[in-house]
Image: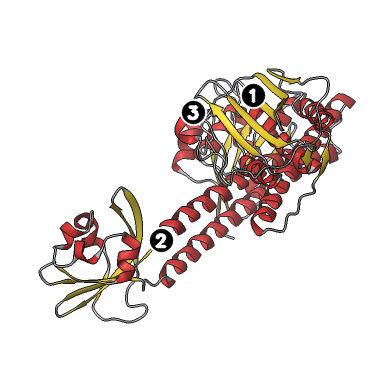
């Protein structure tokens, strides 16, 4: 194992002297830095990618919890262990839910502390190895890319002399618009990217690595994987269109990063709570034990829902999902779901979840389980995008031969330009979580697909910063089913 670097942060000078000595006696191949303030620690953390960080939870100025948040921002993925004093179990639980790797209670059990720190270092170094392997695989993938679709020839004077049908199909530029003209004029943006295209001196597979470059043609951004081969009369360029692949890879990359983040937080909370319950050196009263068990139950439910969404989306894509078509008592189903969601979000005292429906409504034709999933996703979405609280209202009403299920919130809202995209797979309005909103980006995609398969439609009305209204329309069981619009209805 390579040398590991650890940072210890504590305002207790005596502990800063004693703890590193104890660790060096028990651990091999470790370098230890110390800081007596959070501000000094942050400077070190920004300069050095530590394998693990140990910090006291109670410090003057910026405390350990605030430092933990800064570490998550500056060095995400770095395991952080919190040192807690006697009676600080609630703070410890808060730290675990905030992403701390583990906590160590004072007086410090040196054996437990060393074991936990060694595990944290191993996890960090394994993460680095995985990242290194990922980068190596990406490099190999780029090397294996060969461009053989579009072909054009530029002579020694820089004039396009050949433009094959594939080049026309990919770019939309017909031969008559390109041939006989300088490449810098015929191909928009070529003057900026042409010089950076790799050109081999001899043809053959592997003679050069293609480069992916953007060209904006007639208002469309095309990403072309392109390379060239020089010969006496000029250069022959070959390229293929990677626009869709690039967009898909970006979506996949965002999805993997999002799911990784969404899984890490509940897993850390479950692990930390379970470890606390298992420890024999801590006495927990019934209230604290119940609190830890609630954390485990709530975060387990969160994990289950994430896994369920991923599996359901995969089944939708593959065509393996089959929906039932029965009479569904929507009033009873909606009332049950609202009660469940009230219980799930009981800790959100700033949220008021209300139900408004008439005394009686006819049943709808559909799949009860899948309709339940739709409503859960819509209510969860409304609460999630109401970080400042407010009212979330669920309304049922009959409209001609259809039933309308409405979920209204007073949250962040959706910018006008985003409303045509929110039902897309993996898409999130707040992808960088700048407003504290997480999620996998699958919930509304699942809603659209399930509702469409039940011969219904879903639409949204929203304004940025003024909340959103989602409307699901489903055919009544007693009414003849009309052909659903293949496109999702959306209102600005």
Sort mark 1 into few (<14), some (14-19) or many (20+) by Cα contacts within 10 Å.
Answer: many
Q: Nearer the viewer, residue 324 or 19?
A: 324
> Where on the picture, by quarter, is residue 455?
top right
Q: Is residue 42 visible?
A: yes
Residue sitting at 26 percent across and 63 percent down? 174
| Front of the two marks 1 and 2 | 1
> Where on the picture, by quarter, is residue 160?
bottom left
Q: Which mark is residue 27?
A: none
Q: CA distance from mark 3 to mark 1?
A: 44 Å
Q: Which mark is residue 242?
A: 2
Quarter the N terminus occupies: bottom right
Residue sitting at 78 percent across and 44 percent down? 367
- Left or right, residue 422 beside residue 353: left
Residue 376 place in picture, x, y as percent: 73, 35
Residue sitting at 35 percent across and 70 percent down? 209
SS state under label 2: loop
- Left or right, residue 141 beside residue 26: left
The residue to which callout 1 is attached is 408
Q: Nearer the viewer, residue 245 or 100?
A: 245
- Left or right, residue 162 beside residue 96: left
Residue 377 place in picture, x, y as percent: 69, 36
The residue to which callout 3 is attached is 39
SS state under label 3: helix
Residue 456 place in picture, x, y as percent: 67, 40
| Front of the two marks 2 and 3 | 2
Picture layout, residue 98 above or below residue 171:
above
Q: CA distance from mark 1 to mark 2?
A: 40 Å
Q: Is residue 437 visible?
A: no
Q: Earlier in the sequence, mark 2 or mark 3?
A: 3
Q: Nearer the viewer, residue 18 or 351?
A: 351
Q: Residue furthest right?
A: 286
Q: Earlier in the sequence, mark 1 or mark 2?
A: 2
């Amino acid at each position: 194992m390579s040398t590991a670097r650890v940072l210890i942060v504590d305002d207790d000078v005596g502990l800063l002297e004693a703890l590193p000595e104890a660790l060096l006696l028990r651990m091999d191949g470790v370098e230890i830095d110390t800081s007596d303030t959070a501000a000094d620690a942050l400077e070190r953390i920004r300069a050095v990618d530590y394998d693990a960080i140990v910090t006291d939870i109670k410090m003057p100025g910026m405390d350990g919890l605030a430092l933990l948040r800064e570490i998550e921002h500056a060095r995400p993925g770095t395991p952080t262990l919190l040192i807690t004093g006697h009676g600080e179990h609630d703070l410890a639980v808060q730290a675990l839910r905030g992403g701390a790797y583990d906590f160590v209670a004072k007086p410090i059990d040196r054996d437990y502390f060393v074991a936990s720190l060694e595990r944290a270092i191993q996890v960090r170094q394994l993460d680095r190895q995985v990242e290194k392997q990922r980068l190596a695989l990406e490099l190999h993938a780029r090397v294996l890319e060969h461009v053989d679709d579009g072909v054009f020839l530029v002579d020694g004077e820089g004039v396009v002399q050949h433009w094959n049908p594939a080049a026309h199909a990919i770019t939309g530029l017909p031969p008559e618009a390109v041939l006989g003209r300088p490449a810098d004029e015929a191909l928009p943006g070529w003057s900026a990217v042409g010089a950076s295209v790799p050109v081999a001196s001899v043809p053959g597979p592997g003679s050069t690595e293609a480069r992916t470059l953007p060209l904006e043609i007639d208002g469309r951004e095309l990403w072309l994987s392109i390379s060239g081969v020089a010969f006496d009369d000029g250069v022959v360029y070959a390229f293929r269109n990677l626009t869709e692949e690039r967009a898909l890879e970006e979506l996949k990359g965002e999805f993997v990063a999002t799911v990784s983040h969404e899984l890490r937080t509940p897993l850390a909370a479950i692990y930390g709570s379970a470890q606390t319950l298992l420890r024999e050196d801590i006495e927990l009263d019934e209230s604290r034990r119940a609190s830890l068990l609630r954390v485990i139950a709530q975060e387990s439910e969160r994990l289950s829902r994430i896994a369920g969404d991923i599996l359901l989306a995969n089944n939708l894509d593959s065509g393996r999902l089959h929906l039932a078509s029965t009479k569904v008592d929507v009033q009873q189903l909606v009332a049950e779901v609202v009660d469940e969601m009230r219980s799930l979000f009981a800790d959100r005292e700033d949220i008021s979840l209300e139900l408004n429906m008439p005394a009686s409504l006819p049943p709808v034709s559909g799949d009860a389980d899948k309709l339940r999933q739709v409503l859960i996703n819509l209510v969860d979405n409304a609460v999630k995008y109401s970080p400042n609280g407010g009212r979330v209202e669920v309304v049922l009403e009959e409209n001609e031969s259809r039933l309308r299920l409405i979920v209204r919130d007073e949250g962040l809202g959706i910018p006008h330009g985003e409303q045509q995209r929110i039902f897309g797979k993996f898409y999130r309005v707040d992808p960088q979580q700048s407003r504290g909103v997480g999620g996998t980006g699958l919930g509304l995609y699942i809603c659209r697909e399930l509702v469409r398969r039940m011969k219904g439609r879903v639409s949204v009305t929203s304004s940025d910063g003024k909340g959103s209204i989602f409307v699901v329309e489903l055919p009544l069981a007693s009414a003849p089913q009309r052909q659903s619009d293949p496109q999702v209805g959306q209102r600005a």
